[in-house]
Image (cartoon, grey):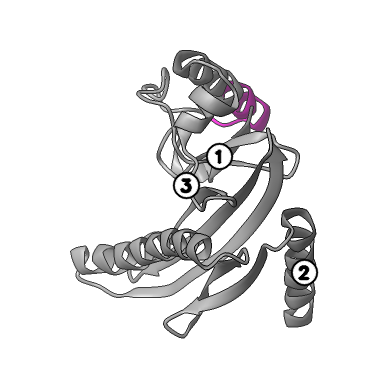
Amino acid sequence: MQKIFFAALFALIVSVQNFCGAATIQDDCYHGQEKVVYPVVHTGDAEIDKKINKEILLEVDRFVTMAHNDAMHNRSRAKDIRMSYDVACNEAGGTVILSIILNKSYYVEHMAHPWSGKSALNFNTASGELMGMDYLTEVGEGVSPDEFKSRIEKSLVDYCRSEGIFLFENALPLKKLPENFYWDENLNIHFIFNHYEVAPYAAGIIDVKI
């Protein structure tokens, strides 16, 4: 299993390196915690690397802190804290986009089930800047926020119908545009809905493509 993992990781690094030119990705462990693995990005520009990796590490910090705060709130301990990541790299309008999806989970003793979730970070590799919804609605797609919201809602309904998932009664219309999204390698936009955001825990983490 370990050999397969490292072979897959090597293939991933090579694929990103080929697409993004000088950009390479290597994994690191959070303060020596071997189960909490996050990506370190190298573009060949120290200032850009600093911007990107600072944002990634802030997201990792937030996750680990959340796990321990959740445990403290329940007067218990956080166990089996884990993180892995997926990467997609592509180009749109001359901008190379690096999308990083962080897969997180932890278990607090005596709770019914582990917590798990995903968060996505999208970077412009030429500047190191985070790319949020403003890029989609103003620069990238030129689609209005209302139109995006409508597309997301339709995709969410279609996906849940196909998977037999029941949405919460108050899930739609969405209260605001979801900001947890990423581009895949084919430039499709995916929106992530974590547990309890729009559906019961049993529905799992919902990933809809528009």
Q: How many marks?
A: 3
Mark 2 secondary-structure assignment? helix
Closer to the eye: label 3 or 2: 3
Quarter of the rendering containing residue 143: top right
Residue 164 part of the magenta-drawn span: yes
Q: Which of 160 and 86 is in front in this view?
A: 86
The residues tagged by marks 3 and 2 sit, at their Cα atoms, a distance apart of 26 Å
* Proximity of marks 1 and 2: CB atoms separated by less than 8 Å: no
For the stretch drawn in magenta, the main secondary structure is helix
Q: Residue 4: x percent and y percent?
A: 79, 75
* Proximity of marks 3 and 1: CB atoms separated by less than 8 Å: no
Lower position in the chain sequence, tag 3 or tag 1: 3
Q: What residue type is labelled 1?
A: Ile
Q: At 36% across and 66% down in the image, what residue appears?
A: 61
Q: At 59% across and 52% down in the image, what residue appears?
A: 125
Lower position in the chain sequence, tag 3 or tag 2: 2
Label 2 Cα neighbours within 10 Å, binned few <14 / some 14-19 / many ≥20: few
Q: Name the residue under label 2.
A: 8
Direction from residue 113 to residue 92 in the image, left or right:
right
Q: In this view, does 171 lie above or below 87?
A: above
Quarter of the rendering containing residue 156: top right
Q: Which of 36 and 136 is in front in this view?
A: 136
Q: In this view, does 146 lie above or below 12?
A: above
- Image quadrant in which the C terminus is located: top right
- Image quadrant in which the N terminus is located: bottom right
**Residue 130 — which label?**
3
Residue 198 part of the magenta-drawn span: no
Label 3 Cα neighbours within 10 Å, binned few <14 / some 14-19 / many ≥20: some
Q: Residue 151: x percent and y percent?
A: 57, 18
Q: Mark 1 points at which residue?
A: 206
Mark 1 secondary-structure assignment? strand
